[in-house]
Image: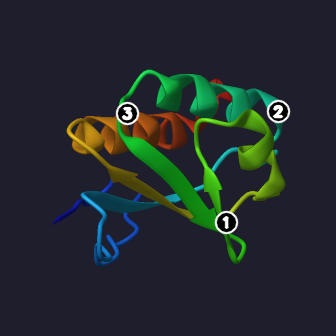
């Protein structure tokens, strides 16, 4: 199990049983996780074999599903936990974390 640090300054959480990588990220873009960021997350997640989920707002969703990501309704300032399990889990978490760090290309 591996816990990672992200670029947003949010401390990593402890990896839970069965998780290879866990990282907390901050939703820093002005509009939160609306359709375009959710689409970017799902598209990025689909490129990995790892099982990837997002945890926030009291629920856990499949990061590979745009509709699931949208159900988080995570607004600006929300903290989301990225969890991945599989051979490429570390790369998946890093890649998705970079989307958050780049604010999904928004200002």
Quadrant placement of the N terminus = bottom left
Of the two numbered discs 1 and 2 on the same chain, state the one appearing first in sequence: 2
Vertical side of 29 occupied by 107: above or below: above
In 3D space, how far apart are the residues under numbered discs 3 and 2 (Cα atoms)?
A: 19 Å
**Is residue 91 left or right of 66 when viewed as pictured?**
left
Residue 53: x %, y % from top left: 52, 53
In 3D space, how far apart are the residues under numbered discs 1 and 2 (Cα atoms)?
A: 16 Å
Task: Write down the residue under mark 1.
Answer: 78
Task: Write down the residue under mark 2.
Answer: 35
User: 34 or 8, which lies in front?
Assistant: 34
- 10 Å crowding of disc 1: few (<14), some (14-19), many (20+): some
The residue at 34%/62% (across/down) is 22
Vertical side of 51 occupied by 18: above or below: below
Tally of numbered tags = 3
Vertical side of 31 occupied by 23: above or below: below
Quadrant placement of the C terminus = top right
For the residues labelled 1 and 3, say whether their Cβ atoms are less than 8 Å apart: no
Of the two numbered discs 1 and 3 on the same chain, state the one appearing first in sequence: 1
Can you tell which of label 1 and label 3 is closer to the viewer? Answer: 3
Residue 50: x %, y % from top left: 35, 39
**Is residue 70 left or right of 50 when viewed as pictured?**
right
């Amino acid at each position: 199990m591996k816990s990672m640090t992200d670029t947003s300054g949010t401390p990593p959480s402890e990896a839970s049983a069965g998780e290879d990588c866990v990282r907390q990220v901050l939703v820093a873009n002005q509009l939160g996780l609306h359709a375009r960021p959710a689409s970017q997350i799902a598209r990025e997640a689909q490129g990995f074999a790892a099982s990837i989920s997002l945890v926030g707002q009291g629920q856990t969703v499949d990061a590979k599903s745009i509709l699931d990501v949208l159900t988080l309704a995570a607004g600006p300032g929300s903290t989301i936990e990225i969890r991945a399990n599989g051979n490429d889990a570390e790369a998946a978490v890093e890649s998705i974390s970079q989307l958050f760090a780049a604010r999904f290309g928004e200002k």
